[in-house]
Amino acid sequence: MFIHWGLYAIPARGEWVRNKEEISVEAYQPYFDEFNPTRYDPKKWARIAVDAGMKYVVLTTKHHDGFCLFDSKLTDYKSTNTPAQRDLVAEYVEAMREAGLKVGFYYSLLDWHHPHYPVDGRHPMRNNEAMKSEQRDTGKYVDYLHGQVRELLSNYGEIDVLWFDFSYDNMSGQTWRAKELVEMVRKLQPGIIMNNRLFSGHAAAAAEGSGMQYGDLETPEQIIPSAGVTDKAGNPKVWEACITLNNNWGYARDDHNYKSPAQVVRMLVECVSKGGNLLLNVGPDAKGEIPAESVAILERVGQWMRINGQSIYGAGRAAELVKPDWGRYTRAGDHLFAHLMDRPVGPVAIDGLPGKLKKARVLADGSEVKTSRPWNAAPDQANDFLTLRDARLPDELDTVVELFVR
């Protein structure tokens, strides 16, 4: 679960509202002055994540607007100085650990509130000539960035995931003093998983060739790569697609364009079938609650996960099999799974198995799926077929069939 939450939940027009509407620090201040999420209950967030079948959570400790959900000693622009008067990150960490979830921190490399962050083309005040002409010292901001990362990784115990966001143009790589930053992160949290967004574009390629590990995973956003993610030699890389449930990361009251439970399940299966993972976002509202529409979708996904999770957890690509027309394959060790998402006409052809199909069982209930070669199959068609009696699949989200091959 990815959670985008902050002051932008009050205007409720998405997390980039300051940028899109060119809102000044002064005009944004009323949201700080009234921020008081009286229904914030991270234990409830944790239950929603667990019930959905998720294993870890990543929370925005600071987004691009610079507002901190933690009690940083380096700024007054933090939740403890709002009417909330709470270190919301501390409560989040405790709740996730109590629920058995891994704990992740998102931290924005951008900061539109800091007086030394450059007023560039992505800054909310990009068209304010007076501010553009100000003398700003990016080095002072980077000192602040490093100091806050140190706080986050020193004050909350073991942290499992660090999710930096994001690099662009010349605000990339060594502008952030990336080598020094990574060394600090690895020293403070030796077991942490860190994403790859300290670099962008050509700088990322150069960093990859430098021999130093600047990140542990690739992070395609709002897209699932057609063949997964590989290096230049074609070798699979560790990756995770980050995707929203609707069209916004932060709470957007009028955005009801939610993905269906079937879409979410199929996105997850597609990621796993290509050797990746899915980080699925929710945006809590100004009171601290995850929208009911999001919760309902995740509950339905969780029902599917409880009976089909064996085909997801610890699973990955079935490299020897070509992606079929009717769905996807995943493999977990010696277990091979066919994910039937579309009902083809007639029996379901299973092509390219590494042996003879011995039997097939629906994963959800263990029921038999008959296997036979129909009399009217073309000579060049597959030898193995699944015979389904009904015109509809047993599970409209994704019917998972375990294939036993000898």
Image (cartoon, rainbow, N blue to C red):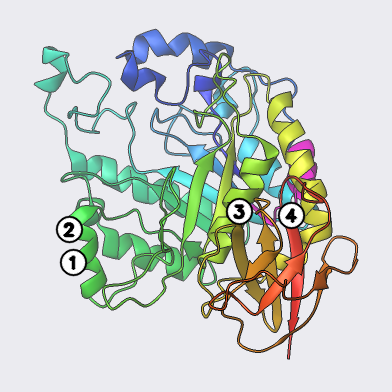
**Residue at 67% over, 82% down:** 333
Which numbered disc covers residue 268?
Answer: 3
Marks 2 and 3, Cα distance to the nearest angstrom? 29 Å
The residue lying at 84 percent from left, 58 percent from top is 307
Q: CA distance from mark 4 to mark 1?
A: 37 Å
Q: Where residue 15 sits: x, y (%)?
A: 45, 26
* Quadrant assignment, res 79: top right
> In the image, residue 330 lies at what x, y percent?
62, 69
Q: Label 1 sits on what residue type?
A: Ala
**Relative to the observer, which residue lies in front, 342 or 252?**
342
Depicted 196 relative to depicted 63: above or below: below
Residue 97 image label:
4
Residue 168's place in the image compared with 186, above or below, is above
Q: Which residue is mark 2?
A: 202
Chain part drawn in magenta: 44-56
Residue kind at label 2, given as amino acid type: His
Q: Is residue 313 visible?
A: no
What amino acid is labelled 3 in the image?
A: Leu
Disc 1 target residue: 206
**What whole-number distance in Å separates the C-alpha atoms at marks 1 and 3?**
31 Å
Q: CA distance from mark 1 to mark 2?
A: 6 Å
> As drawn, is 24 to the left or to the right of 168?
right
The residue shown at (77%, 50%) is: 393
